[in-house]
Image: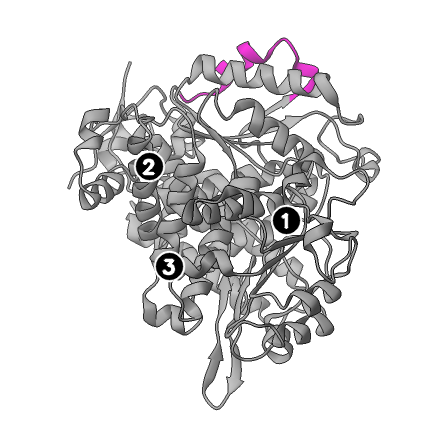
Amino acid sequence: MIPRPCIIHKRGADILHDPWINKDTGFPLTERNRLGLRGLLPPRVISFEQQYARFIESYRSLEKNTQNEADTSAVALAKWRILNRLHDRNETLYFRVLIDNIKDFAPIIYTPTVGLVCQNYSGLFRRPRGMYFSAKDKGEMMSMIYNWPSQRVDMIVLTDGSRILGLGDLGVHGIGIPIGKLDMYVAAAGLNPQRILPVMLDVGTNNLKLIDDPLYLGLRQPRLEGEEYLSIIDEFIEAVLTRWPKAIIQFEDFQMKWAFETLKRYRRRFCMFNDDVQGTAGVALAGLLGTVRAQGRPLDHFPNQKIVVVGAGSAGLGVVSMTVQAVAKMTGKAETAAQNIFLLDKDGLITKERKNLDPAAVPFAKDPGQMGELRDGDSLREVVKKVKPDVLLGLSGVGGLFDEEVLKAMRESGSSRPAIFAMSNPTMNAAEAFKYAGENIVFASGSPFENVKLGKGKVGYVNQANNMYLFPGIGLGALVSGARFVTDGMLQAAAERLASYMTDEEIQKGILFPSVNSIRDITAEVGAAVVRAAVEEQLAEGYEGYLGVGPKDLANMSQEETVKYVRRNMWYPNYSPLVQEK
Protein backbone atom coordinates (compact mmCIF):
# COMPACT_ATOMS: atom_id res chain seq x y z
CA MET A 1 0.00 0.00 0.00
CA ILE A 2 1.38 3.42 -1.01
CA PRO A 3 1.67 5.75 2.02
CA ARG A 4 -0.59 8.79 1.93
CA PRO A 5 1.25 12.03 1.08
CA CYS A 6 2.26 14.42 3.81
CA ILE A 7 1.44 18.08 3.10
CA ILE A 8 4.27 20.38 4.27
CA HIS A 9 4.91 24.12 4.26
CA LYS A 10 8.71 23.96 4.28
CA ARG A 11 11.39 23.85 1.63
CA GLY A 12 15.12 23.20 1.30
CA ALA A 13 17.30 23.06 4.42
CA ASP A 14 14.27 23.67 6.67
CA ILE A 15 13.04 20.19 5.76
CA LEU A 16 16.38 18.59 6.68
CA HIS A 17 16.23 20.28 10.10
CA ASP A 18 12.72 18.97 10.87
CA PRO A 19 12.89 15.43 12.35
CA TRP A 20 9.16 14.89 11.70
CA ILE A 21 9.67 14.90 7.92
CA ASN A 22 13.42 14.51 7.36
CA LYS A 23 14.49 11.39 5.44
CA ASP A 24 18.23 12.14 5.48
CA THR A 25 19.80 10.49 2.40
CA GLY A 26 16.51 8.69 1.71
CA PHE A 27 14.91 11.51 -0.33
CA PRO A 28 14.32 10.27 -3.91
CA LEU A 29 15.62 12.48 -6.72
CA THR A 30 12.11 13.65 -7.65
CA GLU A 31 11.59 15.01 -4.11
CA ARG A 32 15.03 16.56 -4.04
CA ASN A 33 14.16 18.50 -7.19
CA ARG A 34 10.65 19.37 -6.10
CA LEU A 35 11.54 20.49 -2.58
CA GLY A 36 14.78 22.37 -3.22
CA LEU A 37 17.01 19.68 -1.69
CA ARG A 38 19.30 18.99 -4.65
CA GLY A 39 22.88 19.76 -3.72
CA LEU A 40 22.09 19.79 0.03
CA LEU A 41 22.57 16.00 0.30
CA PRO A 42 25.19 13.55 -1.01
CA PRO A 43 24.12 12.37 -4.49
CA ARG A 44 23.45 8.71 -3.69
CA VAL A 45 19.92 7.82 -2.54
CA ILE A 46 20.00 5.37 0.37
CA SER A 47 16.88 3.25 0.89
CA PHE A 48 14.99 3.12 4.18
CA GLU A 49 16.14 -0.49 4.67
CA GLN A 50 19.79 0.49 4.12
CA GLN A 51 19.50 3.39 6.59
CA TYR A 52 17.93 1.01 9.12
CA ALA A 53 20.70 -1.58 8.69
CA ARG A 54 23.40 1.09 9.01
CA PHE A 55 22.00 2.37 12.30
CA ILE A 56 21.61 -1.12 13.77
CA GLU A 57 25.20 -1.92 12.76
CA SER A 58 26.40 1.26 14.48
CA TYR A 59 24.44 0.42 17.63
CA ARG A 60 25.69 -3.18 17.76
CA SER A 61 29.23 -1.90 17.31
CA LEU A 62 28.76 0.32 20.37
CA GLU A 63 27.44 -2.68 22.33
CA LYS A 64 30.44 -4.78 21.32
CA ASN A 65 32.95 -2.06 22.20
CA THR A 66 31.46 -1.48 25.65
CA GLN A 67 30.63 -5.07 26.68
CA ASN A 68 33.56 -5.21 29.13
CA GLU A 69 33.03 -1.69 30.46
CA ALA A 70 32.69 -1.72 34.25
CA ASP A 71 30.67 1.52 34.45
CA THR A 72 27.22 0.29 33.39
CA SER A 73 25.68 3.75 33.85
CA ALA A 74 28.11 5.26 31.33
CA VAL A 75 27.28 2.47 28.86
CA ALA A 76 23.54 3.00 29.29
CA LEU A 77 23.92 6.75 28.66
CA ALA A 78 26.10 6.10 25.59
CA LYS A 79 23.32 3.89 24.18
CA TRP A 80 20.75 6.57 24.99
CA ARG A 81 22.85 9.21 23.20
CA ILE A 82 23.08 7.26 19.95
CA LEU A 83 19.32 6.70 19.97
CA ASN A 84 18.64 10.31 20.91
CA ARG A 85 20.76 11.60 18.05
CA LEU A 86 18.62 9.60 15.64
CA HIS A 87 15.46 10.85 17.38
CA ASP A 88 16.60 14.45 16.94
CA ARG A 89 17.35 13.92 13.27
CA ASN A 90 14.85 11.44 11.78
CA GLU A 91 11.78 10.40 13.77
CA THR A 92 10.44 7.99 11.16
CA LEU A 93 13.59 5.88 11.19
CA TYR A 94 13.90 6.24 14.97
CA PHE A 95 10.44 4.84 15.65
CA ARG A 96 10.84 1.97 13.16
CA VAL A 97 14.06 0.99 14.91
CA LEU A 98 12.32 1.27 18.27
CA ILE A 99 9.25 -0.77 17.26
CA ASP A 100 11.29 -3.57 15.68
CA ASN A 101 13.73 -3.81 18.62
CA ILE A 102 11.47 -2.82 21.49
CA LYS A 103 12.82 -5.41 23.94
CA ASP A 104 16.38 -4.11 23.51
CA PHE A 105 15.58 -0.41 23.32
CA ALA A 106 12.71 0.07 25.81
CA PRO A 107 15.13 -0.12 28.79
CA ILE A 108 17.21 2.63 27.12
CA ILE A 109 14.52 5.16 26.20
CA TYR A 110 12.28 4.23 29.17
CA THR A 111 12.95 2.65 32.57
CA PRO A 112 15.53 2.21 33.94
CA THR A 113 17.88 4.40 31.83
CA VAL A 114 15.47 7.34 31.70
CA GLY A 115 16.17 7.89 35.41
CA LEU A 116 19.88 8.36 34.65
CA VAL A 117 18.97 10.71 31.81
CA CYS A 118 16.86 12.87 34.14
CA GLN A 119 19.65 13.01 36.73
CA ASN A 120 22.10 14.22 34.07
CA TYR A 121 19.69 16.17 31.87
CA SER A 122 21.39 19.57 31.94
CA GLY A 123 24.66 18.04 30.75
CA LEU A 124 22.92 15.90 28.11
CA PHE A 125 20.70 18.69 26.73
CA ARG A 126 21.35 19.40 23.05
CA ARG A 127 18.06 20.62 21.59
CA PRO A 128 14.62 21.25 23.09
CA ARG A 129 11.90 18.62 22.87
CA GLY A 130 8.36 19.30 24.07
CA MET A 131 7.19 22.46 25.83
CA TYR A 132 8.16 24.15 29.08
CA PHE A 133 5.68 26.20 31.10
CA SER A 134 6.99 27.85 34.25
CA ALA A 135 5.74 29.89 37.18
CA LYS A 136 7.18 32.93 35.36
CA ASP A 137 4.74 32.34 32.50
CA LYS A 138 1.60 33.01 34.53
CA GLY A 139 -0.86 34.95 32.40
CA GLU A 140 0.95 34.01 29.16
CA MET A 141 0.10 30.32 28.72
CA MET A 142 -2.94 30.85 26.50
CA SER A 143 -0.75 32.49 23.86
CA MET A 144 2.27 30.23 24.50
CA ILE A 145 0.33 27.08 23.63
CA TYR A 146 0.06 28.32 20.03
CA ASN A 147 3.86 28.28 19.74
CA TRP A 148 3.71 24.50 19.33
CA PRO A 149 3.96 23.84 15.57
CA SER A 150 1.53 20.92 15.32
CA GLN A 151 -2.08 21.84 14.53
CA ARG A 152 -3.39 18.73 16.30
CA VAL A 153 -2.31 17.08 19.55
CA ASP A 154 -3.90 13.83 20.73
CA MET A 155 -1.80 13.00 23.78
CA ILE A 156 0.06 15.12 26.32
CA VAL A 157 2.22 13.71 29.12
CA LEU A 158 2.67 16.29 31.86
CA THR A 159 5.02 16.37 34.86
CA ASP A 160 6.11 18.92 37.42
CA GLY A 161 9.30 16.95 38.17
CA SER A 162 8.51 16.68 41.87
CA ARG A 163 8.81 12.89 42.23
CA ILE A 164 10.76 11.36 39.37
CA LEU A 165 10.74 7.56 39.74
CA GLY A 166 12.38 6.85 43.11
CA LEU A 167 14.80 9.75 42.66
CA GLY A 168 12.76 12.56 44.22
CA ASP A 169 12.56 16.19 43.12
CA LEU A 170 14.50 16.64 39.87
CA GLY A 171 12.82 19.88 38.80
CA VAL A 172 12.99 20.66 35.09
CA HIS A 173 15.22 17.61 34.55
CA GLY A 174 12.01 15.57 34.86
CA ILE A 175 11.12 16.37 31.22
CA GLY A 176 12.89 13.10 30.35
CA ILE A 177 9.92 11.17 31.76
CA PRO A 178 7.22 12.63 29.44
CA ILE A 179 9.58 12.22 26.49
CA GLY A 180 10.22 8.55 27.32
CA LYS A 181 6.53 7.85 28.01
CA LEU A 182 5.47 9.36 24.69
CA ASP A 183 8.13 7.39 22.83
CA MET A 184 6.45 4.30 24.30
CA TYR A 185 3.04 5.65 23.20
CA VAL A 186 4.30 5.83 19.62
CA ALA A 187 6.06 2.45 19.73
CA ALA A 188 3.36 0.53 21.61
CA ALA A 189 0.11 2.34 20.78
CA GLY A 190 0.96 3.72 17.37
CA LEU A 191 0.20 7.34 18.20
CA ASN A 192 1.34 9.70 15.46
CA PRO A 193 4.57 11.39 16.69
CA GLN A 194 3.39 14.68 15.19
CA ARG A 195 0.38 14.59 17.54
CA ILE A 196 2.10 14.06 20.89
CA LEU A 197 3.42 16.68 23.31
CA PRO A 198 5.74 16.21 26.32
CA VAL A 199 5.29 19.04 28.83
CA MET A 200 7.31 20.21 31.82
CA LEU A 201 5.49 22.43 34.30
CA ASP A 202 8.34 24.15 36.15
CA VAL A 203 7.08 25.54 39.45
CA GLY A 204 10.54 25.58 41.04
CA THR A 205 12.45 22.92 42.93
CA ASN A 206 13.22 22.16 46.57
CA ASN A 207 16.36 20.28 45.55
CA LEU A 208 19.15 22.58 46.75
CA LYS A 209 21.75 20.63 44.79
CA LEU A 210 19.98 21.60 41.56
CA ILE A 211 19.54 25.22 42.59
CA ASP A 212 23.29 25.44 43.24
CA ASP A 213 24.17 23.70 39.96
CA PRO A 214 25.41 26.32 37.44
CA LEU A 215 24.18 24.11 34.56
CA TYR A 216 20.64 23.68 35.93
CA LEU A 217 18.13 24.76 33.25
CA GLY A 218 15.06 25.35 35.43
CA LEU A 219 13.76 28.03 37.81
CA ARG A 220 16.07 28.65 40.76
CA GLN A 221 13.37 29.07 43.39
CA PRO A 222 11.48 26.93 45.91
CA ARG A 223 8.42 25.07 44.63
CA LEU A 224 5.12 26.88 44.62
CA GLU A 225 2.53 25.45 47.02
CA GLY A 226 -1.19 25.66 47.72
CA GLU A 227 -3.49 27.76 45.57
CA GLU A 228 -0.52 29.42 43.88
CA TYR A 229 0.58 26.01 42.58
CA LEU A 230 -2.92 24.95 41.50
CA SER A 231 -3.51 28.22 39.67
CA ILE A 232 -0.51 27.46 37.42
CA ILE A 233 -1.89 24.01 36.55
CA ASP A 234 -5.39 25.43 36.02
CA GLU A 235 -4.05 28.00 33.58
CA PHE A 236 -2.09 25.39 31.65
CA ILE A 237 -5.11 23.06 31.42
CA GLU A 238 -7.32 25.90 30.20
CA ALA A 239 -4.78 26.81 27.51
CA VAL A 240 -4.46 23.19 26.29
CA LEU A 241 -8.20 22.56 26.14
CA THR A 242 -8.80 25.85 24.34
CA ARG A 243 -6.51 24.84 21.48
CA TRP A 244 -6.99 21.04 21.59
CA PRO A 245 -10.27 20.25 23.37
CA LYS A 246 -10.01 16.51 22.57
CA ALA A 247 -6.44 16.07 23.84
CA ILE A 248 -5.87 13.44 26.54
CA ILE A 249 -3.56 14.47 29.38
CA GLN A 250 -1.56 11.91 31.35
CA PHE A 251 -0.20 13.22 34.66
CA GLU A 252 3.18 11.71 35.51
CA ASP A 253 5.51 11.72 38.54
CA PHE A 254 3.73 14.30 40.69
CA GLN A 255 4.41 14.07 44.41
CA MET A 256 1.67 12.23 46.29
CA LYS A 257 -0.38 15.16 47.59
CA TRP A 258 -0.59 16.75 44.14
CA ALA A 259 -1.11 13.43 42.36
CA PHE A 260 -4.31 12.82 44.31
CA GLU A 261 -5.39 16.46 44.37
CA THR A 262 -5.09 16.92 40.60
CA LEU A 263 -6.77 13.58 39.92
CA LYS A 264 -9.72 14.55 42.10
CA ARG A 265 -9.79 18.07 40.64
CA TYR A 266 -9.74 17.20 36.93
CA ARG A 267 -10.88 13.63 36.27
CA ARG A 268 -14.52 14.64 35.71
CA ARG A 269 -13.67 17.81 33.79
CA PHE A 270 -11.78 16.35 30.82
CA CYS A 271 -10.10 13.16 29.60
CA MET A 272 -7.10 12.58 31.87
CA PHE A 273 -5.52 9.99 34.14
CA ASN A 274 -2.57 9.68 36.48
CA ASP A 275 -0.27 6.85 35.47
CA ASP A 276 1.45 6.54 38.86
CA VAL A 277 -1.84 6.16 40.70
CA GLN A 278 -4.01 4.40 38.10
CA GLY A 279 -1.60 2.81 35.63
CA THR A 280 0.53 1.19 38.33
CA ALA A 281 -2.65 0.01 40.05
CA GLY A 282 -3.92 -1.61 36.85
CA VAL A 283 -0.67 -3.49 36.23
CA ALA A 284 -0.56 -4.65 39.85
CA LEU A 285 -4.21 -5.82 39.69
CA ALA A 286 -3.45 -7.78 36.51
CA GLY A 287 -0.53 -9.43 38.34
CA LEU A 288 -2.67 -10.19 41.41
CA LEU A 289 -5.35 -11.83 39.27
CA GLY A 290 -2.65 -13.81 37.45
CA THR A 291 -1.27 -14.97 40.81
CA VAL A 292 -4.62 -16.53 41.69
CA ARG A 293 -4.52 -18.47 38.41
CA ALA A 294 -0.89 -19.50 39.09
CA GLN A 295 -2.05 -20.97 42.41
CA GLY A 296 -4.50 -23.16 40.47
CA ARG A 297 -7.51 -21.39 41.93
CA PRO A 298 -10.53 -19.81 40.21
CA LEU A 299 -10.62 -16.02 40.01
CA ASP A 300 -13.52 -15.86 42.48
CA HIS A 301 -10.93 -16.82 45.11
CA PHE A 302 -9.27 -13.41 44.66
CA PRO A 303 -11.17 -11.73 47.56
CA ASN A 304 -9.62 -14.34 49.92
CA GLN A 305 -6.04 -13.43 48.99
CA LYS A 306 -4.09 -11.86 51.84
CA ILE A 307 -2.05 -9.01 50.38
CA VAL A 308 0.65 -6.97 52.15
CA VAL A 309 1.40 -3.66 50.40
CA VAL A 310 4.59 -1.78 51.34
CA GLY A 311 4.44 1.89 50.38
CA ALA A 312 1.61 4.33 51.03
CA GLY A 313 2.52 6.88 48.37
CA SER A 314 0.57 7.58 45.20
CA ALA A 315 1.42 4.20 43.64
CA GLY A 316 0.74 2.14 46.79
CA LEU A 317 -2.57 3.83 47.57
CA GLY A 318 -3.59 3.57 43.91
CA VAL A 319 -2.95 -0.19 43.95
CA VAL A 320 -4.86 -0.69 47.20
CA SER A 321 -7.79 1.41 45.97
CA MET A 322 -8.16 -0.48 42.67
CA THR A 323 -7.74 -3.86 44.43
CA VAL A 324 -10.49 -2.97 46.92
CA GLN A 325 -12.76 -1.89 44.05
CA ALA A 326 -12.15 -5.21 42.27
CA VAL A 327 -12.93 -7.19 45.44
CA ALA A 328 -16.09 -5.16 46.06
CA LYS A 329 -17.19 -5.79 42.46
CA MET A 330 -16.70 -9.56 42.91
CA THR A 331 -18.33 -9.86 46.33
CA GLY A 332 -20.85 -7.04 46.26
CA LYS A 333 -19.66 -6.14 49.78
CA ALA A 334 -17.80 -2.83 49.71
CA GLU A 335 -17.66 -2.60 53.51
CA THR A 336 -15.43 -5.70 53.87
CA ALA A 337 -13.48 -5.37 50.61
CA ALA A 338 -10.28 -4.18 52.35
CA GLN A 339 -10.22 -6.74 55.18
CA ASN A 340 -7.44 -8.89 53.66
CA ILE A 341 -5.21 -5.97 52.63
CA PHE A 342 -2.46 -4.75 54.96
CA LEU A 343 -0.84 -1.39 54.16
CA LEU A 344 2.56 -0.30 55.50
CA ASP A 345 4.53 2.93 55.19
CA LYS A 346 7.96 3.93 56.50
CA ASP A 347 6.56 3.78 60.05
CA GLY A 348 5.19 0.26 59.70
CA LEU A 349 1.64 -1.11 59.63
CA ILE A 350 -0.99 1.60 59.22
CA THR A 351 -3.94 1.43 61.59
CA LYS A 352 -6.63 3.85 62.67
CA GLU A 353 -4.60 4.42 65.85
CA ARG A 354 -1.96 6.25 63.80
CA LYS A 355 -1.59 9.94 64.62
CA ASN A 356 -1.53 12.41 61.72
CA LEU A 357 -2.76 9.70 59.35
CA ASP A 358 -2.84 10.81 55.71
CA PRO A 359 -6.51 11.25 54.69
CA ALA A 360 -5.91 9.22 51.51
CA ALA A 361 -4.81 6.21 53.63
CA VAL A 362 -7.71 6.34 56.11
CA PRO A 363 -10.06 3.97 54.18
CA PHE A 364 -7.37 1.28 54.19
CA ALA A 365 -6.08 1.65 57.77
CA LYS A 366 -6.73 -1.39 59.97
CA ASP A 367 -9.33 -1.18 62.72
CA PRO A 368 -7.71 -2.02 66.11
CA GLY A 369 -10.56 -4.37 66.94
CA GLN A 370 -9.90 -6.54 63.88
CA MET A 371 -6.13 -6.93 64.01
CA GLY A 372 -5.57 -9.90 66.28
CA GLU A 373 -1.85 -10.01 67.12
CA LEU A 374 -1.04 -7.05 64.89
CA ARG A 375 -0.22 -3.60 66.28
CA ASP A 376 0.13 -0.15 64.75
CA GLY A 377 3.66 0.36 63.45
CA ASP A 378 4.52 -3.36 63.24
CA SER A 379 7.54 -3.86 60.96
CA LEU A 380 7.31 -5.59 57.60
CA ARG A 381 8.96 -8.72 59.04
CA GLU A 382 6.43 -8.86 61.89
CA VAL A 383 3.47 -8.36 59.56
CA VAL A 384 4.64 -11.05 57.12
CA LYS A 385 5.25 -13.54 59.95
CA LYS A 386 1.86 -12.89 61.54
CA VAL A 387 -0.31 -12.49 58.43
CA LYS A 388 1.38 -15.17 56.24
CA PRO A 389 0.28 -13.34 53.09
CA ASP A 390 -0.35 -14.77 49.63
CA VAL A 391 1.20 -11.67 48.05
CA LEU A 392 3.92 -9.23 49.13
CA LEU A 393 3.83 -6.08 47.01
CA GLY A 394 6.56 -3.41 47.21
CA LEU A 395 5.83 0.14 46.07
CA SER A 396 8.12 2.10 48.35
CA GLY A 397 10.99 4.33 47.27
CA VAL A 398 13.04 2.93 50.18
CA GLY A 399 15.43 0.19 49.06
CA GLY A 400 16.36 -3.03 50.83
CA LEU A 401 12.99 -3.68 52.49
CA PHE A 402 12.65 -7.19 51.07
CA ASP A 403 15.66 -8.53 52.97
CA GLU A 404 16.60 -12.15 53.71
CA GLU A 405 14.39 -12.38 56.81
CA VAL A 406 11.31 -11.05 55.03
CA LEU A 407 11.85 -13.36 52.07
CA LYS A 408 12.33 -16.38 54.35
CA ALA A 409 9.12 -15.43 56.17
CA MET A 410 7.32 -15.51 52.81
CA ARG A 411 8.47 -19.13 52.45
CA GLU A 412 6.20 -19.86 55.45
CA SER A 413 3.25 -18.17 53.75
CA GLY A 414 -0.07 -19.99 53.89
CA SER A 415 -0.20 -19.82 50.08
CA SER A 416 0.51 -22.77 47.81
CA ARG A 417 2.44 -20.35 45.62
CA PRO A 418 3.33 -17.03 47.25
CA ALA A 419 3.94 -14.00 45.06
CA ILE A 420 6.52 -11.24 45.48
CA PHE A 421 6.07 -8.06 43.46
CA ALA A 422 9.06 -5.71 43.85
CA MET A 423 7.65 -2.98 41.62
CA SER A 424 9.51 0.13 42.77
CA ASN A 425 12.87 -0.24 40.96
CA PRO A 426 14.19 -2.67 43.59
CA THR A 427 17.75 -2.95 44.81
CA MET A 428 17.23 -6.66 45.53
CA ASN A 429 18.02 -9.04 42.70
CA ALA A 430 15.60 -11.70 41.55
CA ALA A 431 17.95 -14.58 42.45
CA GLU A 432 17.69 -13.66 46.15
CA ALA A 433 13.89 -13.89 46.03
CA PHE A 434 13.97 -17.45 44.64
CA LYS A 435 16.81 -18.45 46.98
CA TYR A 436 15.20 -17.31 50.23
CA ALA A 437 11.45 -17.34 49.53
CA GLY A 438 11.46 -20.63 47.59
CA GLU A 439 11.70 -21.81 44.01
CA ASN A 440 7.91 -22.04 43.72
CA ILE A 441 7.23 -18.32 44.11
CA VAL A 442 5.77 -16.01 41.50
CA PHE A 443 8.10 -13.01 41.09
CA ALA A 444 7.63 -9.66 39.38
CA SER A 445 9.78 -6.53 39.26
CA GLY A 446 9.23 -3.01 37.98
CA SER A 447 12.49 -3.09 36.01
CA PRO A 448 13.76 -5.80 33.65
CA PHE A 449 15.85 -8.66 35.07
CA GLU A 450 17.05 -11.91 33.52
CA ASN A 451 15.25 -15.14 34.43
CA VAL A 452 16.91 -17.11 37.24
CA LYS A 453 18.45 -20.55 36.65
CA LEU A 454 17.39 -22.72 39.57
CA GLY A 455 19.29 -25.90 38.73
CA LYS A 456 18.17 -29.23 37.30
CA GLY A 457 16.87 -27.42 34.24
CA LYS A 458 14.36 -25.36 36.23
CA VAL A 459 13.82 -21.66 35.53
CA GLY A 460 12.53 -18.97 37.87
CA TYR A 461 10.63 -16.58 35.62
CA VAL A 462 11.13 -12.89 36.34
CA ASN A 463 8.11 -10.87 35.25
CA GLN A 464 8.39 -7.18 34.46
CA ALA A 465 5.31 -5.62 36.09
CA ASN A 466 5.70 -2.32 34.30
CA ASN A 467 3.11 0.33 33.44
CA MET A 468 4.06 0.09 29.76
CA TYR A 469 1.70 -2.87 29.48
CA LEU A 470 -1.27 -0.63 30.32
CA PHE A 471 -0.86 3.11 29.85
CA PRO A 472 -0.46 2.98 26.03
CA GLY A 473 -3.69 0.97 25.76
CA ILE A 474 -5.55 3.22 28.18
CA GLY A 475 -4.53 6.31 26.22
CA LEU A 476 -5.19 4.76 22.80
CA GLY A 477 -8.56 3.33 23.86
CA ALA A 478 -9.66 6.66 25.32
CA LEU A 479 -8.53 8.44 22.14
CA VAL A 480 -10.20 6.23 19.52
CA SER A 481 -13.43 5.94 21.53
CA GLY A 482 -13.60 9.70 22.03
CA ALA A 483 -14.08 9.09 25.75
CA ARG A 484 -15.13 12.16 27.74
CA PHE A 485 -13.39 10.84 30.87
CA VAL A 486 -11.20 7.93 31.96
CA THR A 487 -13.22 6.04 34.58
CA ASP A 488 -12.43 3.35 37.14
CA GLY A 489 -14.49 0.95 35.02
CA MET A 490 -12.31 1.59 31.97
CA LEU A 491 -9.14 1.11 34.02
CA GLN A 492 -10.41 -2.13 35.54
CA ALA A 493 -11.41 -3.42 32.09
CA ALA A 494 -7.86 -2.69 30.91
CA ALA A 495 -6.33 -4.56 33.89
CA GLU A 496 -8.63 -7.56 33.46
CA ARG A 497 -7.79 -7.84 29.76
CA LEU A 498 -4.07 -7.76 30.53
CA ALA A 499 -4.58 -10.44 33.19
CA SER A 500 -6.46 -12.71 30.78
CA TYR A 501 -3.94 -12.25 27.94
CA MET A 502 -1.66 -15.03 29.21
CA THR A 503 -2.43 -18.71 28.55
CA ASP A 504 -2.96 -21.18 31.41
CA GLU A 505 0.27 -22.95 30.43
CA GLU A 506 2.27 -19.71 30.75
CA ILE A 507 0.59 -18.83 34.04
CA GLN A 508 1.44 -22.23 35.55
CA LYS A 509 5.10 -21.57 34.77
CA GLY A 510 4.85 -18.33 36.75
CA ILE A 511 4.73 -16.06 33.68
CA LEU A 512 2.17 -13.36 34.49
CA PHE A 513 3.05 -10.73 31.88
CA PRO A 514 3.75 -11.16 28.17
CA SER A 515 6.99 -10.51 26.33
CA VAL A 516 7.66 -6.86 25.55
CA ASN A 517 8.03 -7.98 21.94
CA SER A 518 4.22 -8.38 21.87
CA ILE A 519 3.61 -4.83 23.13
CA ARG A 520 1.62 -3.65 20.08
CA ASP A 521 -0.68 -6.66 20.21
CA ILE A 522 -1.18 -6.24 23.97
CA THR A 523 -1.92 -2.53 23.53
CA ALA A 524 -4.52 -3.24 20.84
CA GLU A 525 -6.30 -5.71 23.13
CA VAL A 526 -6.16 -3.40 26.16
CA GLY A 527 -7.24 -0.43 24.02
CA ALA A 528 -10.23 -2.40 22.71
CA ALA A 529 -11.23 -3.26 26.30
CA VAL A 530 -11.13 0.45 27.16
CA VAL A 531 -13.24 1.30 24.09
CA ARG A 532 -15.89 -1.27 25.04
CA ALA A 533 -15.98 -0.01 28.63
CA ALA A 534 -16.38 3.59 27.40
CA VAL A 535 -19.28 2.49 25.18
CA GLU A 536 -20.94 0.60 28.07
CA GLU A 537 -20.66 3.66 30.31
CA GLN A 538 -22.04 5.86 27.50
CA LEU A 539 -18.92 8.03 27.52
CA ALA A 540 -17.77 7.27 23.95
CA GLU A 541 -18.31 10.17 21.56
CA GLY A 542 -16.54 8.66 18.54
CA TYR A 543 -13.24 9.46 16.90
CA GLU A 544 -12.58 12.00 14.18
CA GLY A 545 -9.72 10.05 12.66
CA TYR A 546 -9.53 9.34 8.95
CA LEU A 547 -11.98 6.44 9.51
CA GLY A 548 -14.63 8.78 10.96
CA VAL A 549 -16.27 6.43 13.50
CA GLY A 550 -19.22 7.66 15.58
CA PRO A 551 -20.60 6.42 18.92
CA LYS A 552 -23.27 4.25 17.24
CA ASP A 553 -20.62 2.59 15.07
CA LEU A 554 -18.58 1.78 18.19
CA ALA A 555 -21.62 0.37 19.98
CA ASN A 556 -22.39 -1.96 17.06
CA MET A 557 -18.87 -3.42 16.88
CA SER A 558 -18.22 -6.94 18.12
CA GLN A 559 -15.24 -7.60 20.38
CA GLU A 560 -13.17 -8.79 17.42
CA GLU A 561 -14.22 -5.82 15.30
CA THR A 562 -13.25 -3.43 18.12
CA VAL A 563 -9.73 -4.90 18.26
CA LYS A 564 -9.40 -4.55 14.47
CA TYR A 565 -10.67 -0.97 14.68
CA VAL A 566 -8.06 -0.10 17.32
CA ARG A 567 -5.29 -1.69 15.23
CA ARG A 568 -6.32 0.27 12.12
CA ASN A 569 -5.79 3.51 14.04
CA MET A 570 -2.18 2.67 14.94
CA TRP A 571 0.44 4.72 13.09
CA TYR A 572 3.34 2.80 11.58
CA PRO A 573 6.58 4.48 10.45
CA ASN A 574 7.14 4.63 6.70
CA TYR A 575 8.51 7.44 4.57
CA SER A 576 5.55 9.33 3.11
CA PRO A 577 5.73 11.29 -0.14
CA LEU A 578 6.16 14.98 0.72
CA VAL A 579 4.06 17.59 -1.06
CA GLN A 580 4.74 21.28 -0.52
CA GLU A 581 1.67 23.47 -0.16
CA LYS A 582 2.54 26.95 -1.35
Residue at 40% over, 35% down: 193
Q: Can residue 138 be found in the magenta stretch?
A: yes
Lower position in the chain sequence, tag 3 or tag 1: 1
The numbered dot on residue 115 is: 1
Instruction: Report if the CB atoms under discs 2 and 1 are less than 8 Å apart.
Output: no
Q: SS class of the residue under badge 3? A: helix
- Going from the N terminus, do you reach mark 2 or mark 3 first? 3
Q: Amino acid at mark 1?
A: Gly
* Front residue (pair 440, 517): 440
Q: Quadrant of the C terminus?
A: top left
Q: Amino acid at mark 3?
A: Asn
> Label 2 to label 1, Cα distance in Å?
34 Å
Residue 486, image x, y percentages: 43, 31
Q: Which residues are magenta?
A: 134-150
Determine whether, in the image, residue 217 is placed left or right of residue 105.
right
Residue neighbourhood size for the residue with mark 3, other residues' Cα within 10 Å, grouped as few (<14), some (14–19), many (≥20): some
Report which quarter residue 391 is drawn in: bottom right
**Residue that label 3 marks:** 517
Farthest residue in the front direction?
A: 369
| Residue 89 drawn above or below residue 382 | above
Q: Is residue 39 above or below residue 116?
A: above
> Count the marks: how many?
3
Residue 533's disc is: 2
| Residue 416 coordinates in the image, percent (x, y) | 50, 75
Task: Determine whether the residue tagged by mark 2 lies in a helix, strand or loop.
Answer: helix
Pair 2/1: label in front: 2
